[in-house]
Amino acid sequence: MSIDESLLAEVQQATAALQMTPSDFMKVALERAVQQRKIIELEIRDAKAYADKPQRPEEIDEWQDEQYWEEP
């Protein structure tokens, strides 16, 4: 695996500031990247489902009275 020098410098600064080893920092970063990937996949799946079968106006109207907007 190769890492751009400027990115490596940023990782070194971050690990020093967070008092983490580079290995621990990379582990956390990779875990978060995988979680984010899963979230993006779910968002894409939901968008496709709504595109394939859009809500009908009566489905939306049914919930209109359930909305609550708190006054400031």
Image: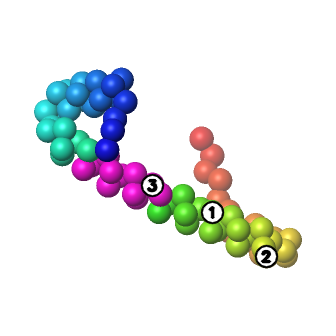
**What percent of the width, then of the height, locates residue 51?**
77, 68
Residue 12 coordinates in the image, percent (x, y)? 23, 28
Magenta-colored stretch includes residue 47 = no
Label 3 to label 2, Cα distance in Å?
26 Å
Looking at the rendered structure, the kind of residue marked 2 is: Lys
Check whether the beta carbons of the residues at disc 3 and disc 2 lie within 8 A of each other: no
Q: Main secondary structure of the magenta part?
A: helix
In the rendering, which numbered label is found on residue 44?
Answer: 1
Colour convention: rainbow
Residue 10 seen in this snapshot: no
Is disc 3 surrounded by few (<14), some (14 to 19) or many (20+) residues within 10 Å? few
Give the mark nearest the N terminus, 2 or 1. Answer: 1
Q: Amino acid at mark 3?
A: Gln
Image quadrant in which the C terminus is located = top right
Give percent across and percent down for residue 22. Answer: 19, 38
The quarter of the picture where the N terminus appears is top left
Residue at x 34%, y 35% (from the top left corner)? 3
The residues bearing labels 1 and 3 have C-alpha atoms spaced at a distance of 12 Å
| Nearer-N-terminus badge (1/3) | 3
Give the side of residue 18 with respect to residue 54, left or right: left
| Residue to which mark 2 is pinned | 53
Residue beneath disc 3: 36
